[in-house]
Amino acid sequence: MEMLAVQLKQDAHCTVKDLARQHGVSARTITRDLSLMRDQGMQIDADRGRGGGVRLDRNWGVGRMNLTYAEAVDLLISIAVAEQMDSPMFLASLGSVRRQLEASFSPNKRDKVNRLKSRILIGVTASTYVQAGASAPPKRVVQALHQAFVDQEHLLLKYQREDGVLSERLIEPHYLLLKYPIWYVVAFDHLMQEPRTFRCDRMHAVTRAGTQFKLRPKEDFAPGLLRDDLSM
């Protein structure tokens, strides 16, 4: 497909029939390859009618970035959150960006990213009462939480309850829940021996425990996920 992309970028008009003859394949194969290239985010235009053809936007590939795997995962997850929120602004090109990033991963890594995305949930917007008492969590807390979530690692945390009392917890961060603009962690709490939901901005200190956990069935967390009041 790389040679096909180069040709489409250089030639003004190429019909599917001509491309099939030049590459020694069937028209069906060329059509399939063009479809795969579009899925990867390539801007392939088609002119209908006599004298028409297909071509690749000459600007495709301009400004391509070299991202690390971790950076690409973060960007993909951010795009997934934006798409789930279904905001009409600035979403026109996200699908194309997502497809290009996903195409750069091996099937193994793509499956891993999809599993991560399935653990990020979008709920209703937080109430004005909850928003009024919210603040941005410290950067060190966000970084430790992020890594433990990705690596499925236990977390030790100091958590401030709604009554202001600090408690120490050992949790399994299974899901992240956004009730805009508040982020929550849906976790299994080893202190209470049950699923609990924690507000990220009430985490005062977070330490990765160095031990991993296995994901529990999503059904185990349904009562916590479906609660309307997550202000604890």
Image (cartoon, helix red, strand yellow):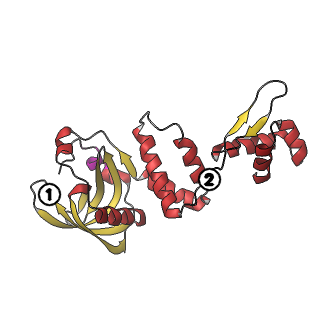
Disc 1 marks a residue whose amino acid type is Arg
Disc 2 marks a residue whose amino acid type is Ala
Mark drawn on residue 161: 1
Callout 1: SS: loop
Q: Position of residue 232 (x, y in %)?
A: 17, 51
Q: Residues within 10 Å of mark 1 (few under 14, many from 20)?
A: some
Q: Position of residue 7 (x, y in %)?
A: 80, 47
Mark drawn on residue 188: none
Q: Disc 2 designates what residue?
A: 103
Callout 2: SS: helix
Q: Main secondary structure of the magenta part?
A: helix
Q: Please tell me how many numbered marks the rendered image carries.
A: 2
Q: Quadrant of residue 85?
A: top left
Q: Quadrant of residue 56?
A: top right
Q: Residue at x 84, y 39 (%)?
A: 27
Q: Residue at x 42, y 63 (%)?
A: 150
Query: Horizontally, is 205 left or right of 85 in the view?
Result: left
Tell me which segment is drawn in magenta: 222-227
Give the farthest residue toward the bottom.
210
Q: Position of residue 31 (x, y in %)?
A: 77, 40
Query: Horizontally, is 16 left or right of 200 in the view?
Result: right
Q: Residue at x 61, y 60 (%)?
A: 106
115 within the magenta span: no
Question: Does residue 124 show up?
Answer: yes
- Check if mark 1's residue and mark 2's residue have beta carbons within 8 Å: no
Query: What's the CA distance linking mark 1 and mark 2?
Result: 43 Å
Give whichever of 15, 125 is nearer the camera: 15
Q: Residues within 10 Å of mark 2 (few under 14, many from 20)?
A: some
Q: Earlier in the sequence, mark 1 or mark 2?
A: 2
Q: Residue at x 20, y 49 (%)?
A: 134
Q: Is residue 157 above or below residue 232?
A: below
Question: Does residue 197 show up?
Answer: no
